Image (tube, grey):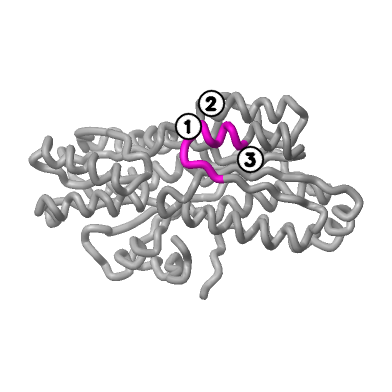
Amino acid sequence: MKRRHFFSAAAAISVAIATAGAVRAQDAGATIGVSIPSATHGFMGGLNWHAQQTIARLSKVYPNLKFVLATAGEPGKQVDDIEDMLATRNIDGLVVLPFESEPLTAPVKAVKDAGKWVTVVDRGLAIDGIEDLYVAGDNTAFGRVAGEYFKANLKSGAKVVVLRGIPTTLDNERVAAFEAAIDGSGIEVLDKQHGNWNRDDAFQVMQDYLSKYPHIDAVWAADDDMAIGVQEAIAQAGRTNEMWIIGGAGMKEIVKRIMDKDPQFPVDVTYPPALISAAIEMTALRFVSDTPVYGRFIIGSTLITPENAERFYFPDSPF
């Protein structure tokens, strides 16, 4: 199995200071809470897997670090999890990927106000500046790279539909960048609805689009799980040859289709679920070393094409 190389920088830092860090960890323990959404779709399944693997590995490297992992299928549960971590688990730091931005802002701010370290991952909070460290993919590039492909491969007057994710700051960033990239191209966006990064929701949204619009040239699904739901709806409607689809994140099923030059999936845009590993690892470094980990750590987005798809194909990966 080939190793993913998206977050090697954080791993390399950890290896370089592992010995010194382990010694320091023996002197002063710390508890790190990790709060993430449940594996509600493929990307989150991969992210959960990487979180568990990283916690298991770091627990061996730094035996005086304790990790409290909680997953939530909706915002209210995640709020409860974080409040419990602060009140009863006595966490020293929190790594959080918000299920949604708005409802998680106040409880995460309470953690910060209590003097704890806060790392926010992927989906930002509704208020800037709460977190000590922000780790994410490049959401602006994610939308821009897709939009540039649309602009380069569709004629003026082409009609497209867009599926948005869960209402979050990162979804806003992606959509704004996509729209900026196609500005001036003459491409008409017929509709934009939330598919919530969910295959079944995307299927229903695409069914609605197909019933409303007699002609669609392309779909920006903005997520590979949503892209699969979109593809199923298009197939059921008998309109497969009419339009192509671009998702995002690098799901192995989609990458394989690109490798095989499936005309319905010409390209994809990377957004690795392994970013949670970088976030947990860098947060651990905060407590076991003097490594500077404040600020922003952004992982770039790359266009996956038939020419480079093999580099991004990991058949043994959970995603």
How far across and down, in percent of the image, does residue 224 sit?
Answer: 35, 53
Q: Which residue occupies the extreme bottom position in the image?
A: 1
Q: State whether residue 210 is above or below residue 109.
A: below
Q: Which residue occupies the extreme front position in the image?
A: 88
Dot 3 alpha-carbon crowd within 10 angstroms: few under 14, some 14 to 19, many 20 or more: some
Callout 2 secondary element:
loop
Q: In this view, does 121 lie to the left or right of 14?
A: left
**Residue at (79%, 49%) from the top-left corner?**
291
Q: Are marks 1 and 2 in contact (CB under 8 Å)?
A: yes
Residue 36 inside the magenta-drawn segment: no
Q: How far apart are marks 1 and 3 (CA)?
A: 15 Å
**Residue at (54%, 65%) from the top-left corner?**
4
Q: Earlier in the sequence, mark 3 or mark 2?
A: 2
Q: Is residue 42 left or right of residue 185?
A: right
According to the picture, the residue beneath numbered tag 1 turns out to be: 169
Range drawn in magenta: 71-81
Q: Is residue 19 left or right of residue 196?
A: right
Q: Earlier in the sequence, mark 1 or mark 3?
A: 1
Q: Which of marks 1 and 2 is nearer the N terminus?
A: 2
Name the magenta segment's main secondary structure: helix
According to the picture, the residue beneath numbered tag 3 turns out to be: 296
According to the picture, the residue beneath numbered tag 2 turns out to be: 126
Q: Are marks 3 and 2 in contact (CB under 8 Å)?
A: no
Q: What residue type is labelled 3?
A: Arg
Residue 176 appears in which quarter of the rendering? top left
Dot 2 alpha-carbon crowd within 10 angstroms: few under 14, some 14 to 19, many 20 or more: some
Q: State whether residue 249 is above or below residue 297.
A: below
Q: What residue type is labelled 1?
A: Thr
